[in-house]
Image (spheres, helix red, strand yellow):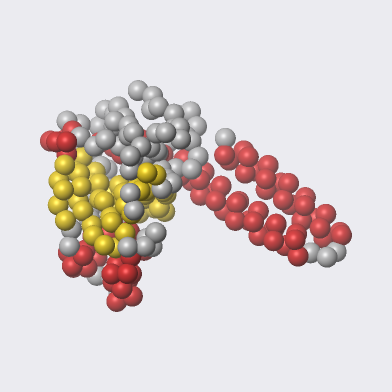
Amino acid sequence: MTHPATSPTTAHALFVWPAKAAVSRPVAKAKIYAHAKPSAALRALFVEQIESITWAYKLAPESINLPAKPEVPEIEVFEIALKLPDVSHSVLRCIDKAIPFPILFVLRQDGKSRPIAAYKRPSNAASDQWVLGDYHAAPWQPDNLPRHGLPFALDLQGLYEQLLRQHLAVPARAGETLRDQLDRLTQLQAKQAAAAKLETQLAQEKQFNRKVEINAQLRTIRSELQALAL
């Protein structure tokens, strides 16, 4: 099943979650602290940035009728009401550390929502540990935009990968695995940072020969960026 293309009048990476999957249970910050053991500085960020945490939905075999996989036994949807316009990734990472399942976060503030998530998988080294990647977020969007239903999937792992792809800044290539897509996005971000650094150097450089050299490097990086983005 092909997912509809995003448009300015349709929410991106925000979904109509199945009613049967609703949990709607508040999550006390103290419970997160007890499991994740955050530092005092990180606890201070929780207090400063987060108004409340709600375990909104649980996507599991019994709630959405899809079989579990060892990599994805269930998927949690957490809604976080913010005090500030954004949240530190270290705060999200602390919550992820406390919950032994993949999580899709939905940040909420002033009538807008922002989906954000990191790819989370069981560790190959220890069965009770999870490996967490970088966080990827869709833009802030008004809550009154129409939302998609869940994409078609054969199991929870397939559903998780499709939902997570909706957060990524570059579309998947034909046949590209989620891990390969994430690796390509990491390369793209590194090249973008390198290009920005060269642009700063170019603006500050006085010598003509050096400017020519920097411009040549920029052309190479921009060509690589274009290839990675396709």
Against 72, residue 25 (above or below) is below
Residue at x 52%, y 43% (from the top left corner) = 184
Looking at the image, the residue that sits furthest to the bottom is 40
Against 211, residue 8 (above or below) is above
Quadrant, the C terminus: top right
Q: Position of residue 7 (x, y in %)?
A: 45, 32
Q: Nearer the viewer, residue 201 or 86?
A: 86
Q: Nearer the viewer, residue 128 or 155?
A: 155
Residue at x 50%, y 45% (from the top left corner) = 185
How many callouts does the rendering have?
0
Location of residue 148 (image quadrant): top left
Whether residue 221 sits left or right of residue 14 in the image: it is right
Q: Position of residue 191 (x, y in %)?
A: 60, 51
Against 175, residue 23 (above or below) is below
Q: Is residue 50 visible?
A: yes
Quadrant, the N terminus: top left
Location of residue 26 (image quadrant): bottom left
Whether residue 93 sits left or right of residue 192 in the image: it is left
Q: Position of residue 223 (x, y in %)?
A: 68, 42
Q: Is residue 131 visible?
A: no
Residue at x 40%, y 38% (from the top left corner) = 12
Looking at the image, the residue that sits furthest to the right is 208
Whether residue 143 sits left or right of residue 21 in the image: it is right
Q: Position of residue 92 (x, y in %)?
A: 32, 59
